[in-house]
Image (cartoon, rainbow, N blue to C red):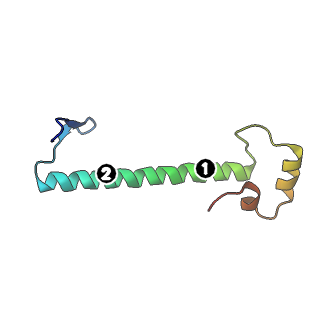
Amino acid sequence: MTAGVRVFFYLEDREGTLDSPTDKIMLSLTAFADELEREKAWRRTRDAMVRKAHAGCCRFGAMTEPARRKASSASSPASTWNLRT
C-alpha cells in the first residue's frame, strides 16, 4: 500500500493486500457484506425499540399522566410515539 500501512484481518488471521484483482474484489465484497450486516443490526435494534415503545416501556424516565392518557386514547400507536416507518 502506498502509505506504508498494513491491514490485518485478525479473525481470518491474514493480511489484507491489494496486489491482484482478486484481492481487490474480495475486499470490496467483504466491505459490502459488512455494510449489509450493519444495516440489518440497525433494523433489528430499531424494531426492538419500536416494540418496546408500543408495549409502554419508557427508557428515559416515567411517562407523565397526560402523556399516559394521550397514549391510551390514541387510535394508532405510531402516531403517539412519532415513529418513522
- Identify the disc placed on residue 48: 1
Dot 1 amino acid type: Ala
In the image, residue 21 sits, relative to residue 10, either above or below, namely below
Task: Give the percent coordinates (x, y) of residue 82.
Answer: 71, 57
Task: Report if residue 19 is visible in the image.
Answer: yes
Task: Give the percent coordinates (x, y) of residue 26.
Answer: 21, 53
Quadrant (top left, top right, bottom left, bottom right) of the C terminus: bottom right
- Residue in the picture at 75% in, 48% down: 56
Please name the residue that numbered disc 2 is placed on: 31
Mark 2 residue element = helix
For the residues marked 2 and 1, what is the alpha-carbon distance in whole angstroms?
26 Å
Q: Earlier in the sequence, mark 2 or mark 1?
A: 2
Within 10 angstroms of label 2, few (less than 14), some, or many (20 or more) residues?
Answer: few
- Residue 5: image quadrant is top left
Task: Give the percent coordinates (x, y) of residue 1.
Answer: 15, 41
- In this image, 41 relative to 63: left or right? left
- In this image, 6 relative to 56: left or right? left
- Residue in the picture at 73% in, 50% down: 55
Task: Report if residue 13 is visible in the image.
Answer: no
- Identify the disc placed on residue 11: none
Are the two marked residues, 2 and 1, in contact with CB atoms closer than 8 angstroms?
A: no
- Residue in the picture at 55% in, 48% down: 45
- Residue in the picture at 20% in, 56% down: 25
Mark 1 residue element = helix
Q: Nearer the viewer, mark 2 or mark 1?
A: 2
In the image, residue 3 sits, relative to residue 49, either above or below, namely above
Tally of marks? 2
Within 10 angstroms of label 1, few (less than 14), some, or many (20 or more) residues?
Answer: few
- Residue 80: image quadrant is bottom right
Residue farthest to the bottom, as pictured: 75
Dot 2 amino acid type: Ala
